[in-house]
Amino acid sequence: MATRHAIDTTVPLAARLERLTSPAERRVADYLSVVGARAAAMSAQEIARAVGTSDATVVRTAKSLGYLSLRDLRQALADDNDDVEISTRLSATIAGRPAAHDVLAGAAERQLQALESMLRRVSGEDFDRATAILAAATRIWWCGTGPSAFLAGYGAFLCRRLGTPAGTLTHAGADHADELLALRDGDAAVVLAYGRIHPYVHVLLDHAVATGVNIILVTDIRGPRLQTPVAVQLNAGRGTPGLFASHGTTIVLVESMVLAIAAREPERATEALASLNQLRHGLTGRRFDVDPD
């Protein structure tokens, strides 16, 4: 049976968010946009609990988006292909943008929307707790695989530059076991895990509990079912669902975390930058300040 709509809903869910004027409904729609087909099996109560709102708000959101009921919205989510091929997502991203500057304008617009969405999903309280844990850690480990491995390396680089000992965990196979041997009591780890929680993450979480390591989980899924709890979860997406993935939002979140750590330990950060300048002077024979980038 075809899905019933009260109004036209042929456009993607993410593109219909601007129809919502209620902040609570925007949070629900934002969550459904990120989770996609995985929300098709969730009840109104489960969605409400994940978002932190009421069942009635979830139902109202479905109707505001143009569906006659939450059941119809869940059916539409189930019909969506959760594993769209990368080539298809790329085509959808660049379609209708013949000029290079059109691609730039579209990318900038999506990034602005993604940043606004992140600010709704990442509460100030959660961010403060996460950065307090990281600032107090003996060493910070940045964990990510695939494209996220480069973000993990960037996070560790920024930490070291500002005086915070840091390392990376970037393997998912057997080599990950060797990486985990470096974790010590008092350390903290920032885990970048998108789409689904992979087996290596579960191994990392279990080992973190055994060694006294606090975990900050950065993900695009609210409330993933984890047997091992994490200290703080920060929900950052990868751009518009169905389009080519973007890590721009995560980069902003990573930089903000490192800067917040430096704000908590300003003397340590200042001393590290002074040492960096001295080392550069020894290498180049002249003194110059740290590059702004």
Image (tube, grey):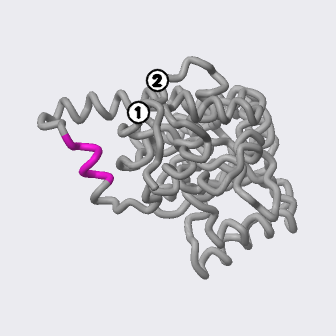
Task: Residue under label 2, please give it.
Answer: 18
Q: Secondary structure at mark 1?
A: helix
Most distant residue in the top direction:
21
Q: Which mark is residue 15?
A: 1
Q: Is residue 157 above or below residue 28?
A: below
Return the mark for residue 34.
Answer: none
Q: Is residue 139 magenta?
A: no
Please report the bounds of the magenta region as a residue range. 89-95
Q: Position of residue 128 (x, y in %)?
A: 76, 31
Q: Is residue 100 above or below residue 19?
A: below
Q: Label 2's element?
A: helix
Q: Residue at x 27, y 28 (%)?
A: 105
Q: Is residue 46 left or right of residue 37?
A: right
Give me the residue at 59% from left, 27% from top: 26
Instruction: Answer few, some or many: residues within 10 Å of disc 1's Cα (few below 14, many 20 plus, some between 14 and 19).
Output: few
Figure label count: 2
Q: Position of residue 231 (x, y in %)?
A: 81, 48
Q: CA distance from mark 1 to mark 2?
A: 7 Å
Give the residue displayed 61% in from the left and 58% down from the top. 143
In the picture, measured across the screen, residue 139 lies left or right of residue 154, that is: right
Q: Is residue 235 left or right of residue 5?
A: right
Does 147 sit above or below residue 104? Answer: below
**Does the CB distance between marks 1 and 2 fall below 8 Å?**
yes
What is the x, y in percent for residue 159? Answer: 62, 43
Q: Residues within 10 Å of mark 2 (few under 14, many from 20)?
A: few
